[in-house]
C-alpha cells in the first residue's frame, strides 16, 4: 500500500468546495423561503407562484403539448359521464 499515493490536498480541496456550495445552497433556499413568505403575506397564492415558476422552466412546445393533452383528457372524462366511469372501474 505504500506504493499508492493518495493526493490528500486535492481531496480536501474538492470536499471544501462541495461544503462551500452546500452552504451557499442552504442560504439561497432560505432566501427563497423568505420571498415566498413575503408574497404570501401580500396575499399571493404560493402554490400558484410555484406552478408559474415550473411552467416558465418548460419549453413552450412541451407546455403546449401538456396543455393540449390535459384539455383532451378533461373533455373525454366529461363526455364519459359517471355511469361509464363506474363500468370502467
Image (cartoon, rainbow, N blue to C red):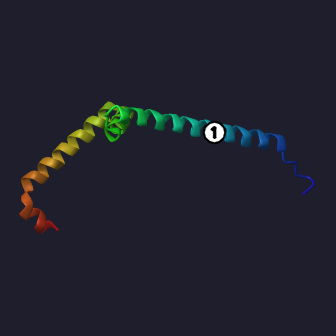
State the residue lying farthest toward the front: 41
User: Would residue 64 be found to the left or right of residue 10 on screen?
Assistant: left
- Whether residue 58 is visible: no
Image side of residue 20 versus residue 25, left or right: right
Against 89, is 39 above or below? Answer: above
Which quadrant holds the N terminus? Answer: bottom right
Task: Count the labels in the image.
Answer: 1
Could you say where residue 5 lies in the image, as x and y percent from the top left? Answer: 87, 48
Q: Which residue is mark 1?
A: 23
Indicate the quadrant where residue 81 lies: bottom left
Residues 36 and 65: in front is 36
Q: Image point 8% across, 61% down: which residue?
A: 82
In front here: 46 or 22? 46
The x and y percentages for residue 39 are 38, 32
Residue at the image point whose x is 30% and y is 36% from the top: 63
Q: Name above or below for residue 45 compared with residue 81.
A: above
Q: Quarter holding the C terminus?
A: bottom left
Q: Nearer the viewer, residue 45 or 85?
A: 45
Where on the picture, by quarter, is residue 51? top left
Helix or strand or loop: what does disc 1 sit on?
helix
The answer to whether residue 15 is above or below residue 43 is below
Residue drawn at x 68%, y 41% is 19
Q: Is residue 47 visible?
A: yes
Compared across the picture, whether 21 is left or right of 35 comes to: right
Furthest residue toward right = 2
Amino acid at each position: 500500500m505504500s506504493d499508492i499515493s493518495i493526493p490528500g490536498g486535492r481531496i480536501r480541496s474538492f470536499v471544501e468546495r462541495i461544503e462551500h456550495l452546500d452552504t451557499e445552497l442552504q442560504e439561497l433556499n432560505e432566501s427563497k423561503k423568505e420571498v415566498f413568505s413575503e408574497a404570501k403575506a401580500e396575499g399571493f397564492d404560493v402554490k400558484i407562484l410555484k406552478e408559474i415558476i415550473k411552467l416558465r422552466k418548460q419549453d413552450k412546445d412541451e407546455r403546449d403539448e401538456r396543455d393540449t393533452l390535459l384539455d383532451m383528457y378533461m373533455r373525454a372524462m366529461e363526455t364519459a359521464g359517471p355511469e361509464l366511469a363506474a363500468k370502467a372501474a
